[in-house]
Amino acid sequence: MAKKARAPWKRSNPRKRAGKASKHLSPAQKSAAKARARRAGRRYPNLVDNMRMAAKKKSSKKKTTKKISKKASKSKSSKAKSRTSAKKTRKRTAKKAKSPKHRVSAREKDPRGGLTAAGRKAFARKQGAHLRPGVTKPESEMTPQEMRRKGSWAVRFYGRAKLPPLVDAKGQPTRHALSAHAWGEPVPRTAAAARRIAAKGERLLARYRRAKARG
C-alpha cells in the first residue's frame, strides 16, 4: 500500500537538508500571499500560501525563458530569410551584368527610322528578341494581328503622358520621331502630330478587339 504524502508543515525544509540557504519571498510575493489568504478567509498567509507564491516565481521564470527562446528563434529565421533574399538579389544583379544591353551600331540603324534587317538579327542573337519590321500596309489591308501590333506601337510611342523630344537642337527629327517612318506614318515634328498617330493606334486597337470578339 502506497504511503500517504505528509503535509508540508510536517516535513523538514528540503533546502536545509541539502545544505542550501533559505530563500525569502519578495515584497510582491508577500502581498500576493496575503491576498490569497484573505480570499480563503484566513487573517494571515500560511505555509501553503507562501509555497504557492514561491512556485509561481519559478513558473514565471520558465515562461520568460520560453518567450526569450521563441524571440531568438524568430530573429534567427528572419535573418536567414534576409540573407537568402540578399543572395537572390546578388544573383540577379550578376546575371544582368553578364548580359549587357546591345548597343546598336550605325549599320544596324535605318537612317530613315527603325532598325535594319541586320539590326533585328543582332538583337535576336544577343538578347533573344524576336523583332519584326513595322506594319506599313494600308488600314484596309491589315489583319487583326497587324492592327494589334501597329496600334500597340503607336500608343506606346506617341500616347505616353510625356513625349520625348521629337526634334534635336538642329531642328532634325530624333530617332524617336523617325520610328514613325518604319511603321508607314509621317514623321512627327510636333506633339500634335505625334498625338494624331497615337489616336490612330487607339482606333486600330479598337478594331482588333471588335474582330477578336466576333471570333
Image (spheres, rainbow, N blue to C red):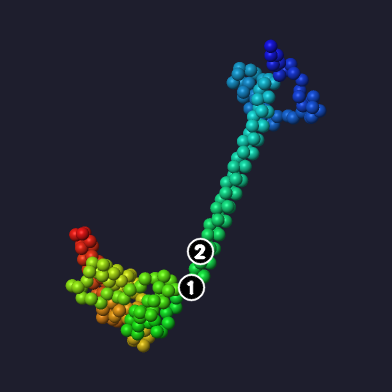
Residue at horizontal 30%, vertical 71%? Answer: 153
Residue indicated by mark 2: 92
Residue at horizontal 37%, vertical 76%? Answer: 120
**Residue 15 locus on image (x, y percent):** 77, 26
Nearest the eye: 127 or 54: 127
- Is 14 on the left or on the right of 89, as rendered? right
Q: Is residue 104 above or below residue 8?
A: below
Say what secondary structure mark 2 lies in. helix
**Residue 58 locus on image (x, y percent):** 67, 32
**Dot 2: few (<14), some (14–19), or many (≥20) neighbours within 10 Å?**
few
Instruction: Identify the image quadrant of the N terminus.
Output: top right
Image quadrant where residue 57 sits: top right
Image quadrant where residue 52 sits: top right
Residue 43 has which mark? none
* Number of numbered markers: 2
Nearest the eye: 195 or 115: 115
- Is 53 on the left or on the right of 130, as rendered? right
**Residue 40 locus on image (x, y percent):** 60, 18
Nearest the eye: 204 or 190: 204
Residue 190 visible at all? no
Task: For marks 2 and 1, give the CA distance.
Answer: 13 Å
Residue at horizontal 43%, vertical 71%? Answer: 127
Residue at horizontal 70%, vertical 29%? Answer: 25
Residue 1 visible at all? yes
Identify which amino acid the numbered label 1 is placed on.
Pro
Identify which amino acid the numbered label 2 is placed on.
Arg
The residue sitting at the bottom extreme is 170
Residue indicated by mark 1: 100
**Residue 124 locus on image (x, y percent):** 40, 73
Instruction: Identify the image quadrant of the C terminus.
Output: bottom left
